Image (cartoon, rainbow, N blue to C red):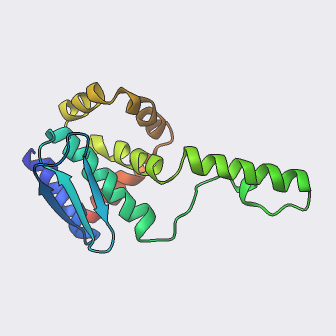
Amino acid sequence: MNKRSATILRSLAEHIRVKIKYIGGMPDGFFGFADPRSRTIVINANKPHDEHVFTILHELAHFVLHFDQPYRLFAPRWVERSYKSTFMVENTYKLKRTLRRRFGREWQADLWALSAFPIVGTRNDLEAFFDRHPDKIAPFFLAVVFQVKARIGKFIRKSIHM
C-alpha cells in the first residue's frame, strides 16, 4: 500500500477507534470483514492494494453508518410519513421493504467507500479496482452525482486534521 493511502486509512481508523489487521492464507473470494465487538477490521493480506483500500473503506463505512449509530434507511420523507389511507400504508411499506433489500447496509457501505476512494487511493488504484469490479462503476457515478464525495471528504479531512 502506498504511504499516503496507508496514512489516511490509519488516521480514519484511529479517529473512529478501529484496529486493522491483515491476515494471509484466507480463501481467494474473501476480502475482509468488520467485527463491531472488538472494533477490528480483518483484511485478506493476499489481495492487491486497491482491494485493501476499498475493503477498509467499506468496513469503516459500516462503523460510521451502522455500528456506531442506529441503522437508518435513508428514504424520502414522504415514505417515512404515517398515513391513514390503507392504500398508502401498504404501498409505503412495500416501498420501504424494497429499498431495504436493494439499498441496504452493504449498498450504503459500498457507496460510502466508492465516494471516499478517490480521496484516499490513487487514480491507478481506482482504475485497477474498476477493472476487476465493473459492477461498481455505476454506483460510483451515482455517488458523485449526489455529491456524497464532498461530505465524506469533509469527514476524512476533519478526522485526520488535513
Q: In the image as oriented, which residue stretches furthest toward the right?
A: 85
Q: Position of residue 126 (x, y in %)?
A: 25, 33
Residue, x 28% and y 40% (percent of image)?
A: 118
Q: Compared to 127, does 151 lie above or below?
A: below
- The image quarter in which residue 136 lies: top left
Quadrant in which the C terminus is drawn: bottom left
Is 31 on the left-hand or right-hand side of 75?
A: left
Quadrant in which the N terminus is drawn: top left
Of residues 43 and 116, the one nearer the viewer is: 43
Q: Position of residue 40 (x, y in %)?
A: 24, 67
Q: Position of residue 70 (x, y in %)?
A: 51, 70
Of residues 18 and 26, the one nearer the viewer is: 26
Residue 160, visible in the rendered structure:
no
Q: Compared to 81, does 45 lie above or below?
A: above
Is 7 on the left-hand or right-hand side of 100?
A: left
Residue, x 19% and y 53% (percent of image)?
A: 43
Of residues 68 and 12, the one nearer the viewer is: 68
Q: Position of residue 10 (x, y in %)?
A: 17, 60
Residue 7, visible in the rendered structure:
yes
Residue, x 40% and y 45% (percent of image)?
A: 110
Is 64 on the left-hand or right-hand side of 159?
A: right
Q: In the image as oriented, which residue stretches furthest toward the left?
A: 3
Is 69 on the left-hand or right-hand side of 83?
A: left
Q: How many numbered badges does the structure rendering display?
A: 0
Residue, x 51% and y 41% (percent of image)?
A: 146
